[in-house]
Image (cartoon, grey):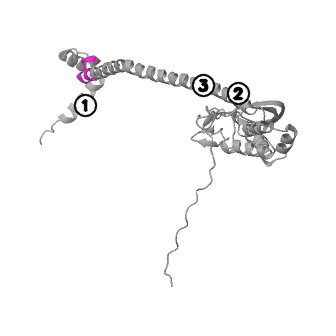
Amino acid sequence: MTAQRPATGNLISAQLIADLVTNTLDPGYAAAAQHRGPTPSRRWFDRPAVAIGCALIGFTLVVAYIHTHRGAPEAAKVHDSLVARVRAAQDRNDGLAAQAQRLNGALTTLRDQALSGNGALSGQLDRDQLLAGQTAAVGPGLQVTLTEPPPTSGSSQPGRAGSVPIGASNILTDRDVRSVVNELWADGAEAISVNNVRLTPTSAIRFAGEAVLVDFAPITSPYQIRAIGNADNLATGFASSDVASRYQTLSSADGIGFEFTEHTTLTLPASPAVAPRFAHPPTPTRSPTPTGTTR
């Protein structure tokens, strides 16, 4: 009989398992770390990419600072030049307005002297100038006021103010002003002004861009339309009109400010002087000679 060989493989495996259970690997890791030595810590500025990036940012900031301070004096010079030009233009306009007022006074004096002996012609001229808006008008009348609704809580846009951008609450336009003006003319108004701008037979109320213009002058909310005439007739006719009914409805629905009041005395300014327009008879022209064959 032959002797049975011992199972050495199983014995080694059992010993390895027992060694792993009884002895941890921490001492081995500690010995390996001690053999390698301490690892040097790297600070953030020791990294080349970070250092290069910081240098580029600093260079950009320095260049921007230099350019800003170099351009500041030039910008200040341009600003001062524009301000000086605006002030000079305003002074020139004020001087021209004063000169025009003096000339108008002298013209009125000469006219009164020339018409001193003709009362009928002088009265007719006064009436024509009043209708043309060339003289100030004083008398009883009616004032109609339209006001934009207040801005909503979620909007920072104010009401219409000439060239202010239109927001959700800005719903009054030139058509609203025109409709009130036309109704007052129809009710018998003799003179009308809109926000202290006198209307003449050639006046125009437009909506240019985002502003309401009266004879190219921007007007703002509230829109005050003043009419001189028989106050009772103006108030009665306007109150019963479709225009007043429409804006009373809009006042309740959209919050538009709308009111009209009678006044015993209203003063409307004269319109700026305009160049007169003259009508001329047509020049007679020869009729064209008919063409064709004659028999």
- Rendering coords of residue 32 (x, y %): 20, 19
Q: Nearer the viewer, mark 3 or mark 1?
A: 3
Return the residue at label 2: 109
Residue pictured at 47% horizontal, 23% vertical: 85
Q: Secondary structure at mark 2?
A: helix
Asked whether 119 or 223 is in front, the reply is 119
Q: Residues within 10 Å of mark 1 (few under 14, many from 20)?
A: few
Q: Quadrant of residue 269?
A: top right
Residue 185 vertical placement versus 148 (above, below):
below
Asked if the magenta segment contains residue 48, the reply would be yes
Which badge, 1 or 2, comes first in the chain's sequence? 1
Return the residue at label 3: 99
Asked whether 61 or 36 is in front, the reply is 61
- Rendering coords of residue 248 (x, y %): 79, 42
Which badge, 3 or 1, comes first in the chain's sequence? 1
Compute the Cα span from label 2 to label 3.
15 Å
Give the label on residue 14, or none: 1
